[in-house]
Image: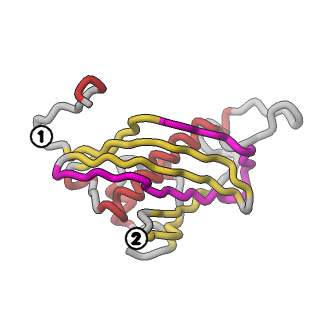
Amino acid sequence: MTLGPLEQAFIDDCPYAPGGQLIDSLLVVDMEKSLIRVRMPTHDQLPITSEQRVHPVRHPRHVSGGLMVHMTGIAGFVHAYYVLGLRHAEGWIGYGGRIHDARYKALAKPGVPIEIECKATKIRKGTKRAFARYDLRFYQGETLVYVGDQTAMWLKIEEGDALPTDDDA
């Protein structure tokens, strides 16, 4: 693993193409603390953000809250890849299970990158399933713009396996 620009192996393994990954750098991988930190460039043409009807006072251009929730999933995938060693190419896929808490602390304006920190606070890993609860923090410069507490389930899916439903949990 190399810190800095994303490795091609990660880009190729991610279940989203680069246009859905929206991160350009791996900043921290701390195995002991079960923590990763990545950088997300921001600009006016981000998905959803680009469709905003902007008003300079009532609705200034900002990184969409829905896009930030998507980025919590991408951060979770980065954590699963680098900390848990789960590979999509080997059958592993993650799904968000629950957003326990999500707080938008400030508007994130396009132009300054967002650094996303994802720390697993609980992990339960088996041979075909892993559960992780994540503390997520998004910073734009010194400003905390988003805080999340979320749970994800990682499954190793093999040919013929059915995806579980909420009733299976």
What is the basis of the colouring in this image?
A: secondary structure
Separation (CA) of disc 1 from disc 2: 34 Å
Q: How many marks?
A: 2
Chief secondary structure of the magenta portion: strand
Image disc number at residue 136 = none
The residue nearer to you, when weighing 126 against 107, is 126
Percent position of residue 80, x then y: 35, 56
The residue nearer to you, when weighing 82 against 88, is 82
Percent position of residue 58, x then y: 85, 31
Give the residue at x 65% y 39%: 64
* Magenta-span inclusion, residue 115: yes
Residue 116 position by quadrant:
bottom right
Q: Give, as a three-letter code, the residue at label 2.
A: Glu
Q: Is residue 67 left or right of residue 90?
A: right
Give the residue at x 29% y 46%: 154
For marks 1 and 2, the one nearer the N-term is 2
Q: Is residue 82 left or right of residue 167?
A: right
The residue nearer to you, when weighing 64 against 127, is 127
Q: Are marks 1 and 2 in contact (CB under 8 Å)?
A: no
Percent position of residue 149, x then y: 51, 44
Give neighbour class at mark 1: few <14, some 14-19, many 20+ (Cα, 10 Å): few
Image disc number at residue 32 = 2
Q: Give, as a three-letter code, the residue at label 1.
A: Glu
Q: Secondary structure at mark 1?
A: loop
Query: Which quarter of the rendering shows the C terminus?
Result: top left
Q: Secondary structure at mark 2?
A: loop
The residue nearer to you, when weighing 65 against 60, is 65
Magenta stretch: give its range: 99-127
Image disc number at residue 159 = 1
